[in-house]
Amino acid sequence: MEYSIAIILIALLQYLAFTFRVGLSRGKYAVRAPKTNGDEQWERIFRVQQNTLEQLTWALLLGLLFIVGRQPFSNLYLKDPPESRTRRDSEYL
């Protein structure tokens, strides 16, 4: 569990760093907010940040889908476990 939390925090810190880089580079490349086009190098910096946000969104949606899907699985599994996963006492004798 700690690894999952660490990975999530690292991903969010990375995104935050990309966001700061976009903001700081606006001055360097003279791209005034709210413009999203201008210097070619700045546009690449901006696209990295935007693409990271899009990928984090997909990861969030997949994570939520996993969580939502586990609940019916748990309910059904506990109610009627598959025969192939149950062990009879005679198998251990």
Image (cartoon, helix red, strand yellow):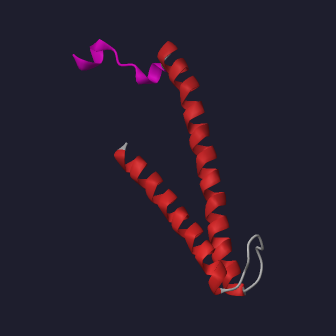
Q: Which span of residues is magenta-colored?
A: 82-93
Report the label total.
0
Front residue (pair 39, 27):
27
- Tell me if 87 is positioned left or right of 93 in this view: right
Which residue occupies 63% across, 72% down?
Answer: 48
Which residue occupies 42% across, 24% down?
Answer: 85
Verify whether residue 73 appears in magenta: no
Quarter occupied by the C terminus? top left
- Tell me if 24 is positioned left or right of 50 in this view: left
**x then y, percent, for residue 56:** 60, 55
Which residue occupies 66% across, 59% down?
Answer: 54
Front residue (pair 56, 28):
28
**x then y, percent, for residue 62:** 61, 45
> In the picture shown, does residue 35 fall above or below 78?
below
Which residue occupies 35% across, 46% down?
Answer: 2
Quarter occupied by the N terminus? top left
> In the picture shown, does residue 14 fall above or below 90?
below
When asked about the image quadrant of residue 21, the answer is bottom right
> In the picture shown, does residue 36 fall above or below 52?
below
